[in-house]
Image: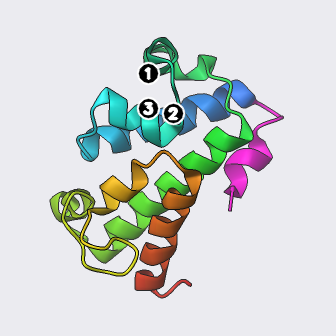
Amino acid sequence: MLSTVQAALPADSAVVAGAALRTFFNIADAWRLNAEQAMTLLGLDSRSTYFKWKKSPESASLNPDKLERLSYIFGIYKALQILLPQAEAADAWLQQANQAAPFSGQSALQRMLSGRVADLYVVRQYLDAQCGWA
């Protein structure tokens, strides 16, 4: 599910990294994530790397793990925009408690913040099913 982002990476990785990370940081702002939450979603341990990427996204080197994470995050964002056309509602959904099976009363964001790529996949898969794409 890495989409065209990974396919395009070898040809012009700085352009792809810059575009992907600018998109990610815009989504993180819309979702009102703090730096630690954004770092967790990206799978980053280093605050200095996070802030370097935020300041200069084209300087990033995105390995397959980061690309997979970004792909899931972009898909989650897109699905929410389709399911909940009002941006505020779509962005707020992540933080609301959810009784659906994958969440067990937690918010989707809590699930995503486990730090595991698999949990990003679960949220993406849930939303894709809600859209009728699964």
Which of marks 1 and 3 precedes in the sequence?
Answer: 3
Residue corresponding to mark 3: 39
Can residue 25 be seen? no
- What residue do we see at 33% from left, 66% from top? 81
Residue 42, percent across and down? 51, 37
Q: Residues within 10 Å of mark 1 (few under 14, many from 20)?
A: some
Report the disc number at residue 21: 2
Residue 49, percent across and down? 52, 16
Quadrant the C terminus occupies: bottom right
Residue 27, percent across and down? 36, 44
Amino acid carrying label 2: it is Leu
Element carrying mark 2: helix
State yes or no: discs 1 and 2 in contact (Cβ < 8 Å).
Answer: yes
Which residues lie in the magenta part? Answer: 1-12
Q: Residue furthest front?
A: 104
Q: Nearer the viewer, residue 127 or 15?
A: 127
Can residue 14 be seen? yes
Q: Distance of mark 1 from mark 2, alpha carbons?
A: 7 Å
In which quarter of the view is residue 60 placed?
A: top right
